[in-house]
Image: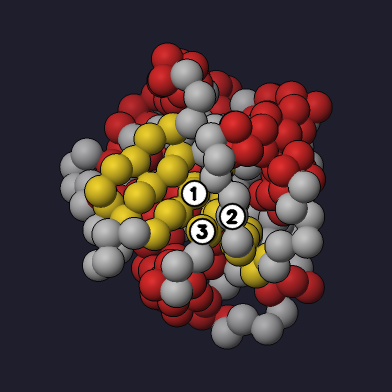
Amino acid sequence: MSTLILLRHGESEWNALNLFTGWTDVPLSSKGRDEAREAGRMMANAGIRPTVVHTSLLKRAVTTANLALEEMGLEWLPVRRSWRLNERHYGALQGLDKKQTAELHGKEQVFVWRRSYDVRPPALEAHDERHPSHDARYAGLAPDAVPASECLADVVVRMLPYWYDAIVPELFAGGVVLVAAHGNSLRALVKHLDGVSEETIPALNIPTGIPRVYRLNEHLVPIESRYLGDENSAREAAEAVAKQAG
């Protein structure tokens, strides 16, 4: 049996301001740093010790992993990073206020942009300074791999090769794998693991800073999954995520 831990980064400064973030590299808020440390304490109290860590290239996920590992005294663990674990790219919505965007375009349209499986938000122009092609960390990617906007289906497509090539071998080897990433890259992974349908996935919300632990059989099929800590707290935190555009 293998163990996989999914950890959405703690609250970021733009989460606190209710802004679309996407690939914008925003730091954790003070609350988010506390959430990251608490995630480490939750894992330690549950007797769960990761043996390897995977993060995105965005500092809110990197910092969350670092603080959680520090809390567990595991700063020395090997850490692997990939753009394939980045948050969904929100295109031209990045930096906009979610509530104001809903007032301008309508709540229904913003819900489609935020939560639909296969509808992308408006794309960034290539010359826009927010476009990933202007960021040195993505300089090695093929031009057609650099997104100007993404839907969740796009995130599934770019995340799954990393799952199969980097994470699955470590699970088969008996590792306890911690993936510190983002709401949508983790939704993509949960969709794959739990077989969530395209119709149901819009309703799935992942709370910040609460580890979700999977026990997987020899075929990496989930036997059990649960959030650590109080179930009501996890449910309330997920509901708060769902209301962010309101």
Considering depth in this image, is 7 or 115 the residue closer to the camera? 7
Q: Is residue 13 left or right of residue 46?
A: right
Q: Of helix, strand and loop, which one carries label 3? A: strand
What residue is disc 3 on?
Answer: 176
Considering depth in this image, is 214 or 196 the residue closer to the camera? 214
Residue at 38% from the left image edge and 47% from the top image edge: 214
Q: Residue furthest front?
A: 47
Residue 20 placement: quadrant: top right
Considering depth in this image, is 70 or 153 the residue closer to the camera? 70
What residue is disc 2 on?
Answer: 50
Amino acid type shown at disc 2: Pro
Q: Of helix, strand and loop, which one carries label 1? A: strand
Label 1 or label 3, whichever lies nearer to me, is: 3
* Image coords of residue 69 (percent x, y): 72, 48
* Label pair 3/2, CB-CB below 8 angstroms: yes
Amino acid type shown at disc 3: Val
What residue is disc 1 on?
Answer: 5
Amino acid type shown at disc 1: Ile
Query: Can the viewer see residue 109?
Result: no
